Image (spheres, rainbow, N blue to C red):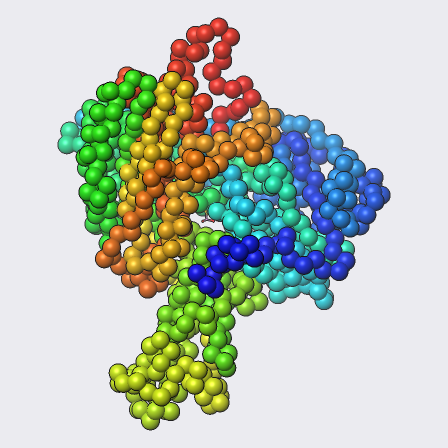
Amino acid sequence: MKGSDLDLHSRGQAGFVDDLPEPEGLLHAAVLPSSVAHGTVKRLDTTKAKRCRGVRAVLTAADIPGINQIGTLVDDEPLLAEQTVDFAGQPVALVLAESEAAARAALAGIELEVEELPAVLDPRRARELGELIVPPRTFCLGEVEAVWEQCQVVVEGTVESGSQEHLYLETQGSLALPGERGSVKVISSTQSPTGVQRVIARILGVAMHRVEVDVTRLGGAFGGKEDQATAWAALAALGAVRCRAPVKLVLHRQEDMVYTGKRHPYCSDYRIGVGADGKVLAYQVEFYQNAGAAADLSPAILERTLFHCTGSYFVPNVKATAYCCRTNLLPNTAFRGFGGPQGMFVIEAAVFKAAAALGVSPAELQEKNLLREADTFPYGMAATRCSAPICWQEVKSRYDYEEARARVDRFNSTHRLLKKGLALMPVCFGISFTNTVLNQGAALVHVYTDGSLSVSTGAVEMGQGVKYKILEVAARVFSIDRSRVKVESTSTLRVANTSPTAASTGADLNGKATEIACKAILERLKQVAAEELKQKDPGKVEIRDEQLYCDGKQTNLNWDRLIPRVYSRRVNLSAQAHYATPGIYFDKAEEKGEPFAYHAYGTALCEVTVDCLRGTYEVDAVKVVHDLGPSLVPQVDLGQAEGGIVQGIGWLTLEEVLYSEEGRLLTNTLSTYKVPDIYHTPKELEVHFLENTENPLGVFHSKAIGEPPLMYGIGVYYALLAAIQAFCPQADLPVAAPMTPERLLMTLYGDRLAELKGFKTGSRRTVPQ
Ligand code: MOS
């Protein structure tokens, strides 16, 4: 796709922060982290480090001219530690030196003495200690207490889901360039240019107009750079202003893993009640979110867990409570799905267990309770244009579910040690930031006199192809060749007050703003064209493939001839536009409202084969029908869907973040942290985009794609559970992710292995998350 970043990526020509040409006098920064998860700083002496070769400065909290605070939702996170350290990996001091090697070597010269305090790593323990970052929140619908007695079965359980390392290919990094009068320009690998700008202004004690943040592209982010690019940008800016020199701070892979927060691990308790007709009557759930040592975005992420607590189902009586628990882990943060996956994973556990108690298949129960048009979500919104049943039925027919079911049953009855598992996974995901204020985007469009276009928006390109979608929008509005459009870097000078590119909304919000700006220019072009063509009604003028038509008839004007005439008539060829999602609101006192512009729907059919002797398994197939509306750029959307699915599978199967009992990250390299590779990718991966759907609230009726497909990975977990169930039908299966081969083996044989002398179940060095 010419003109897209994909084109540059495939040629190895896309540049990232660390690839920028190094300016004269560049200093390199390195960060000293706390190695202790919780403690009191007794002594911090930088004298020796300052004397190291090539070192220009060593900075601590005392060197911050403004406010030492980087918290976004809650002011609870210093940029550099002061009297206490609250997690292992917390930045304590910053070295600035003439080379990267000199900066890192000098870290050893910093003398830091910390008196250790007990570290709390378990969210339930944190709650017992009263360590909640924000007060608990409860979403209610109907009255659960009134209906338990009417249920034919009521089952309860506990669910654990694990953390997840973002593992973006480009690690966190920034280049800061000092300017006049205390200003600074920062090139940052961030999803949130304005967030970085705001924090740097606060750290430096200057107005936001002194800080420019510019983002060309990110080598991946997945939520990990929504809030957590900020610290590295602020440290680089601090160094640049203090030393009056350009400063580069790019984390090494291991530093990135050890210093930055990840997906939130959750543990949850649920209770579900089902009537004799198979309808779920009541669902009660408590979520314990392991937020880590600082709020970061945790309260917002927890809110989305509540929004998605009933998954793709209608439940008339719901009570869902969420606890945001402060522990001494790394501050956990946004990760594709933003708490939604954690919520959906739990209701699928409840449905799985309730189905077993009723003696029916989970699919039967899922289908009976699937969301239908006008069903109410626990937050009061009604499902509209609800394609959940259509996607579900389309999966069953397109991929011949009944035949697959029969084939799997045959396989299981003829194999003793190999078992297959099948699961259907419906996904319903709300599109919009749950924080209503963030649902705005802006664009700045210039048409130059040669007919080429420059488009700036608030959207950050992070490999998701948003720039190519913006380009597509501009080219479609004007009906011009795509090669005429250039989508620029994301700069806070050109587009102010940007929302983070997150919540799958980047293309929607900024694409809409681009559409509005382009249409404003188009109206002016048509006005001029009408005058040139001696036509009174500009509404009769039309551009099709760069050719101008009047009243449906081709004219002698085309794009190349029109634009210079517009300029010579002194008509404005630029436009700035703003878009705010209409009609959305949320009342936090009532916990009711219409928080989402629309929902994305789809269903996956997942099949696995488990080797019940070894605990190993293969993902045979994930086959999806997804309602995307009419896609803006189908290749981009397919890539997002496939990547999301594999990342979701990784979260629930292979990827295991482990901390020591003292709260130090153990899985801090790619030899100890395993992400899916080509061999772990489903052998068959099919994504079919539902046809003939539309979405009036999307750009050209399209739907957001970034996050929803990740949750199809949940189906793989329950397919594994189904295979285990086929091997040991009586087992009351614990639901804990990730289902690594080790955990799968322990699920099959844990009791028997524990009887063997000296064998301990579970690893001593791991802690419950
Ligand atoms: Mo995304 S997880 O909303 O940055």
Residue 104, image x and y in percent? Answer: 73, 42
Asked whether residue 126 appears in the rendered view, the answer is: no
Where the N terminus falls, by quadrant?
bottom left
Residue 30, image x and y in percent? Answer: 70, 44
Asked whether residue 104 appears in the rendered view, the answer is: yes
Relative to residue 615, is residue 91 depicted above or below? below
Q: Quick one: 505 or 479, which is closer to the camera?
A: 479
Residue drawn at point x = 41 percent, y = 72 percent: 481
Relative to residue 217, is residue 375 depicted above or below? above
Residue 185, image x and y in percent? Answer: 65, 61
Residue 233, image x and y in percent? Answer: 63, 52
Q: Is residue 348 left or right of residue 205?
A: left
Could you tell me how many numbered marks the image carries? 0
Q: What is the residue that sits farthest to the left in this orientation?
A: 277
Residue drawn at point x = 46 percent, y = 36 percent: 676
Residue drawn at point x = 57 percent, y = 48 percent: 170
- Using the rendered view, name the quadrant where residue 343 is placed: top left
Residue drawn at point x = 65 percent, y = 31 percent: 36
